[in-house]
Amino acid sequence: MPCCGDCLVTSPNLHRASNGQVFGSVSVTVDVHAGDCIVHSFRDGLGDPVPIRMHLHSLDEIQGAYQVQVGRASSDRRSANVARALEFAAQLIASHKKKNRRG
């Protein structure tokens, strides 16, 4: 059952290039209808950067991951960008949930 009349047939998470929001070297796609997000980033490897993909399935998971990344942000620029991306995702999802409760 759809959560509202604005639901899409496909998830925005499937189209990172057109639906992603970029924070430094980190990008995030948010599916407000499913209440999840996917964060794409890179970590330093032995030679080339290693891609990282975090799929967070709920607002609680997003908020928990945000707390961890904020704790690391003072010493790691990538963590600061991940924290900004997670904060953005949490705000979008919370706003969507609030809108659906009212209307």
Image (spheres, grey):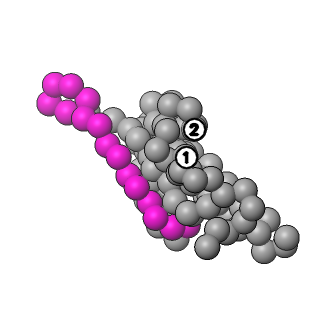
Label 2 sits on residue: 19
Q: Position of residue 24 (x, y in %)?
A: 51, 30
Bin the neighbour count of mark 2 within 10 Å (Cα to Cα): few under 14, some 14-19, many 20 and up: some
- Measuring 46% from the left and 64% from the top, which residue is drawn there? 57
CB atoms at circles 1 and 2 under 8 Å apart?
A: yes
Q: Is residue 55 magenta?
A: yes
Q: Residue at x 29, y 37 (%)?
A: 51
Specify the segment rendered in magenta.
45-59
Q: Which residue is mark 1?
A: 12
Q: Is residue 89 shown left or right of residue 47? A: right
Toward the top, the furthest residue is 47
Q: Residues within 10 Å of mark 1 (few under 14, many from 20)?
A: some
Does dot 1 land on a helix, a strand or a loop?
Answer: helix
How far from the left and from the top, in percent, is residue 85? Answer: 54, 45
* Front one among 1 and 62: 1
Query: In which quadrant will I find the N terminus?
Result: bottom right
* Apparent side of residue 74 relative to residue 46 in the rendered image (left or right): right
Q: Position of residue 17 (x, y in %)?
A: 50, 31
Q: Decide: is 12 above or below 23.
A: below
Per the image, label 2 sits on a secondary structure element best described as helix
User: Is 35 within the magenta?
Assistant: no
Quarter of the image with the C terminus in it = bottom right
- Whether residue 93 is visible: yes
Task: Indicate left or right for 103 with 32 as reference.
Answer: right
Q: Nearer the viewer, residue 6 or 16?
A: 6
Residue occupying image coordinates x 72% and y 65%: 4
The extreme right residue here reads 103
Judged left or right of residue 44, residue 62 is: right
Q: In 3D space, how far apart are the residues under numbered discs 1 and 2 (Cα atoms)?
A: 6 Å
Q: Could you say where residue 16 lies in the image, as x and y percent from the top left?
A: 49, 37
